[in-house]
Image: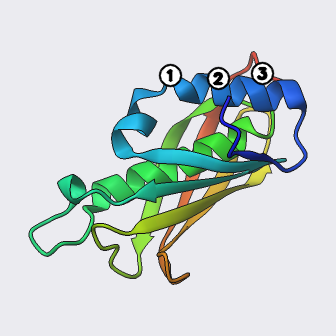
């Protein structure tokens, strides 16, 4: 288990299950994403912006930023005890994210019904500047609690 990830108040078994699943998540590892905290309906992530993900101007490609935001939203949903898949998402790119920096993402469940959830995430540069904001609708699996 990742001892650097903080449990901010979710069930200990749920916390361990999420981290165990994340250990085998190839996308998280490939992108250099780590989970910094999990709380009730919230998740914090960080990512080193490897130059392999940058464009010709030295900023991180928007698709990589969208992937980080999607993961922050999905993990915040899992931290609420539910699982699902992204139905749709939008991302507003606000400031460039430069290579060789570390960014943080914070996901938060806004609403969770019986079948769908609305979740948002914010992405910050290492200077604390808001770089992107995402919002998504997720289909909630019926076999998870709600």
**Of all residues shown, which one is farthest toward the top?**
143
> In the rendered view of the protein, which quadrant contains the C terminus?
top right
Dot 1 crowding, Cα within 10 Å, few <14, some 14–19, many 20+: few
Q: In front here: 77 or 59?
A: 59
In this rendering, the answer to whether 144 lies above or below 111 is above
Say whether disc 3 or disc 1 marks the residue closer to the N-terminus: 1
Circle 3 — which element? loop
CA–CA distance between discs 3 and 1? 21 Å
Q: Report the side of 35 relative to 143 (left or right).
A: left
Instruction: Look at 21% across and 59% down and name the residue there.
Output: 51
Q: Residue at x 34, y 73 (%)?
A: 97
Read off the residue under disc 1: 24
Residue 7 visible here: yes
- Where residue 125 appears, x then y in whole percent? 47, 75
Name the residue located 45 percent from the left edge and 55 percent from the top edge.
47
* Residue 28 place in picture, x, y as percent: 45, 38
Question: Contact, CB < 8 Å: mark 3 with mark 2?
Answer: no
Tell me, yes or no, whether the two marked residues, 2 and 1, touch with CB atoms within 8 Å.
yes
Residue 99, image x, y percentages: 27, 68
What residue would you read off at disc 2? Answer: 20
- SS class, disc 1: loop
Disc assigned to residue 144: 3
């Amino acid at each position: 288990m990742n001892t650097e990830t903080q449990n901010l108040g979710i069930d200990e078994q749920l916390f361990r299950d999420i981290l165990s699943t994340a250990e085998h998540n190839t996308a998280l590892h490939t992108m250099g994403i780590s989970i910094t905290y999990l709380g009730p309906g919230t998740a914090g992530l960080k990512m080193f912006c490897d130059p392999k993900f940058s464009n010709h101007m030295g900023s991180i490609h928007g698709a990589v930023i969208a992937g980080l935001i999607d993961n922050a939203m999905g993990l915040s949903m899992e931290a609420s005890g539910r699982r699902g898949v992204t139905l749709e998402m939008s991302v507003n790119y606000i400031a460039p994210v430069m290579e060789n920096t570390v960014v943080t993402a914070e996901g938060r469940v806004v609403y969770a019904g019986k079948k769908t959830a609305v979740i948002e995430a914010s992405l910050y540069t290492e200077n604390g500047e808001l770089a992107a904001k995402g919002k998504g609708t997720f289909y909630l699996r019926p076999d998870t609690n709600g």
